Image: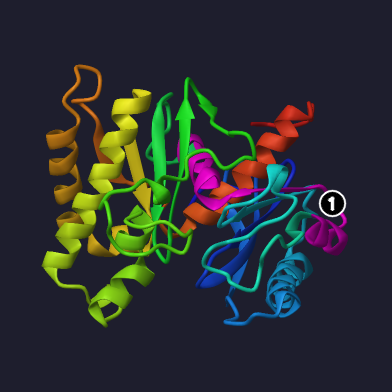
Amino acid sequence: MSGLHQTGPVVLAVDVGGTKMAAAAVDPAGEILVQTSVPTPASDDANAIFGALAAAVDQVRSTTVERPVVCGVGCGGPMEADGETVSPLNIGGWRRFPLRSRLADLVGIPVVVDNDAKALALGEGWLGSARGVRNYVAMVVSTGVGGGIVLDGRLLEGTNGNAGHIGHVVVEPDGRACACGGRGCLEAEASGLSIASATGRPASEASDTVRRRTGTLVGRAVASVANLLDVELAVVAGSVALGFGAVFFDAAQREIELRSRLDFSRSTRIIPAGLGADGPLVGAAALGRRALVEAGESRLPW
C-alpha cells in the first residue's frame, strides 16, 4: 500500500495461513511499515509451528521504530470464541492450540485473534473494495477457502466466532471428501489444495476448464449467501481467485446471475478484493484497530 505515515497507535498484524505465516507493523492509515513472512512448517509439532511464527513476529518487533500497542491476528479456522484456541483445517499440527495466550505471552500487549477471512472482511470494508458498503461477503480462495460477512455495517460473529465459514457451504452434493468430515464443501472442490489433489498439478498451472469450474462453484456459494442474507457484493481475495483472474470472476458472476433470481439478490456482484497481497495483514490490523475503538481509545485518529 502507499500513502503518508500517520501518527498514532501502531498495530502488530499477524496472518497465519496453511502455506505461510506473516507479521507486520501497520500504521493508522493502513500503511504497512515493515513486514516479514516464513513458510508454515509442515509439522505435527505444535510448538515447532509456533516457533516459526514467533520468529517472524520477533523480527518485526525488533525492526519497528514505534512500539505496537495491540496485536491483531487472522488465522484459519475453525476456532473457539475470541480465538482462545484455534484448529485450522490446513495446519494439522494445531488442534485447539492456545494461539492468543501464547502470542500474548510473547509480545506483552493485548492480542485479538479471529478468522483470517473475517479479518479480510474488516480490512476490505476499511480500505478495500467494500469501502462504503454496508452488506457484503468477503472471501479468501487460496490454500483453503474462508469467508466473513458484514450485515448492516457489522461483522457477523456467531456463537463461537465462526460465522461466515463459506468454505463449508455444500456446492457439489456427494462431491469430494472435505477435511471437515463432510463432502462436496466449497473448500473440498475449489481450494488450492483440492485442485492440486484432483488434477495432480499445482493450482497455478490449472487449465481454463478448471479455472472456470472453480469460479462457477464459488459463484454458487455466493448466490446461496446472497439469497439467504440479502448482501449486494462479494469481494474475493486469495492466490487461487486472483491468480485465475478474469476466467474465474466471469464464471462466478454468470453462476450468481443464474442462481440469484430473487428481486433483492439478482443484482449481486462479485469482484476482486482491493487490498491485493496486503489484504491479510491489513485485515489483521483492522482487528486490532477495532479492539482499540471498542476499548474507547481516545487518541485514535481513525
- Badge 1 crowding class, 10 Å Cα cut-off, few under 14, some 14 to 19, many 20 or more, is some
**Residue 150: % across, % down:** 47, 30
Q: Nearer the viewer, residue 171 or 144?
A: 171
| Amino acid at the residue labelled 1 | Ile
**Residue 296: % across, % down:** 78, 26
Q: Seen in the image, is 152 located left or right of residue 52?
A: left
Q: Nearer the viewer, residue 57 or 184?
A: 184
Q: Which residue is the extreme one toward the front?
A: 174
**Residue 7: % across, % down:** 71, 42
Q: Is residue 117 magenta?
A: yes
Q: Is residue 133 magenta?
A: no
The image shows residue 287, relative to residue 87, as above or below, that is above
Please give the name of the residue rendered at 63% of the width and 34% of the height, measured from the top-left corner. 159
Please give the name of the residue rendered at 18% of the width and 25% of the height, measured from the top-left corner. 266
Please give the name of the residue rendered at 15% of the width and 49% of the height, measured from the top-left corner. 250
Which color mode does the image show?
Answer: rainbow
The answer, for residue 230, to whether it is visible in the render is yes
Question: For the magenta stretch, what is the residue range?
Answer: 101-126
Please give the name of the residue rendered at 20% of the width and 30% of the height, measured from the top-left corner. 260
Quadrant in the rendering for residue 61: bottom right
Secondary structure of the residue carrying tag 1 is loop
Residue identified by numbered label 1: 109
Q: Main secondary structure of the magenta part?
A: helix
The image shows residue 245, relative to residue 205, as above or below, that is above
Quadrant in the rendering for residue 135: top left
Q: Nearer the viewer, residue 36 or 96?
A: 96
